[in-house]
Amino acid sequence: MTARGEMLLRQELERLKGVERPRIVAAIAEARSHGDLSENAEYDAAKEEQGLCEARIKDIESKLASANIIDVTKLKPAAGSPLKVVFGCTVTLLNVDTDEEITYKIVGEDEADIEANLMSYKTPIAKGLLGKTMDDEVCINIPKGQVTYEIIDIQYV
């Protein structure tokens, strides 16, 4: 994952542990104070929310423990070597058929947000771009058919 992705997961983990977990514990205590737990919908809902919260905490902790943080700014190739599309880079593409330009940053699955042009490295487009260099034309099979892109810029930022 990128350094930004790690930071976002750490922030979410902090929020879950410091804000959500105490809120849920308070909600469970409040529901218990209402008496009979066997027919207490508030209690059931709070316990379910607690389970989801704890599962997410464990998921984030596991991801952070096994994560390989990539700092793309340190991946620049040696002088004279071409820039290649790699995990963490920002790539600008030209759709050969429509002349439309689009820029994507290739990121980990947890960071992906296509609306913000953050594309998971596991998508067909990213897989087709990885390892390619400037001015390469890449024909990629996507769910809607086939698209051809020309790589017009690669940035390691």
Image (tube, helix red, strand yellow):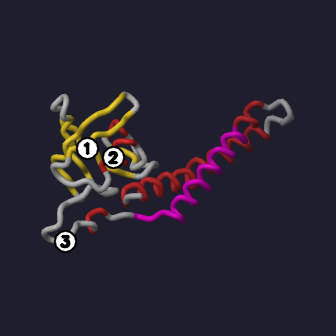
Span shown in magenta: 46-69
Q: Amino acid at mark 1?
A: Val
Q: Nearer the viewer, residue 44 or 79?
A: 79
Which one is nearer the viewer's eye here, 108 or 150?
150
Mark 1 and mark 2: Cα distance apart in space = 7 Å
- Is 62 colored magenta in this rendering? yes
- Badge 3 or badge 2: first in the primary sequence: 3
The residue carrying mark 2 is 128
Q: Amino acid at mark 3?
A: Ala
Count the marks: how many?
3
To which residue does mark 1 refer?
Answer: 138
- Foreground disc of the pair 1, 3: 1
Residue 113 location, x and y as percent?
Answer: 38, 41
Q: Does the magenta stretch mainly form a helix, a strand or a loop?
A: helix
Above or below residue 71? Residue 9 is above
**Mark 1 touches mark 2? (CB < 8 Å):** yes
The CA distance from mark 1 to mark 3 is 24 Å
Which image quadrant for residue 37?
top right
Name the secondary structure under disc 3. Answer: loop
The mark that comes first in sequence, 1 or 3, is: 3
